[in-house]
Amino acid sequence: MKTSEAATTFVIEVEGQPVTLRRLPTSGEIALDREFQRRLKASWGPGGFAANAKGMLTFLREQGMIAELRMCMEKLTEMQATNAPPSWEATQEFRRTPAGVAAELFFRRDPTIHADLTERAVVAMVTAANAWEIHEAIMAGLSDDGKSGPATVGVGDGGG
């Protein structure tokens, strides 16, 4: 069965510009999730899991909870050594950040319509002020079953 164009794309407006996004097949959604995980881990910088857990480790050290600190460090080292992915919760939290929203917008853009839309341009369009709205627009577009045609979800132009 061939999927209609209406069922595979939807349009949102970002900073006054319509952007056509794609609903992805399962393999595409898996690839997007892996990209979120990769970018999230990269955002932690050197030290990976331990760098991300610095607040917790500092607390344990300051409270004199040496056995717990040692256990945490062993687990974090194991996770880093085995290249464990971030948790689903951490990945979903990253997805809602400006960096995650920009990554999803770029990943889902329809390249046949937006061939000239660079990742740098997408990153410039997504700000801390509009990331949540864009994320919500993407989620609303994805929840539309496509039966009534493409979903058009407007995102404010920053005017409030």
Image (spheres, rainbow, N blue to C red):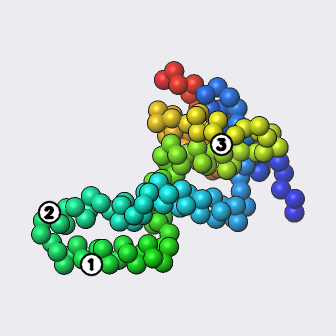
Instruction: Return the residue found at the far front.
Output: 46
Residue at 19 percent across and 66 percent down: it is: 60
Looking at the rendered structure, the kind of residue marked 2 is Glu
Q: Percent x, y for residue 64?
A: 12, 69
Left or right of 63 in this view: 75: right
Q: Which of the 4 quarters of the picture holds residue 33? A: bottom right
Q: Amino acid at mark 1?
A: Met
The residue under the point 55% across, 36% down is 126
Query: What residue is at 76 percent from the left and 45 percent from the top?
Result: 110
Provide the residue designation for mark 1. 71
In the picture, the disc for residue 62 is 2
Task: Judge the density around disc 1: few (<14), some (14-19), many (≥20) Cα neighbours within 10 Å.
Answer: few
In the depicted structure, whether residue 148 falls above or below residue 47: above
Of the image marks 2 and 1, the number of the one nearer the N terminus:
2
Secondary structure under tag 2 reads helix
Residue appearing at x 82%, y 43% in the figure: 112
How many residues crowd mark 3 within 10 Å: few (<14), some (14–19), many (20+)? some
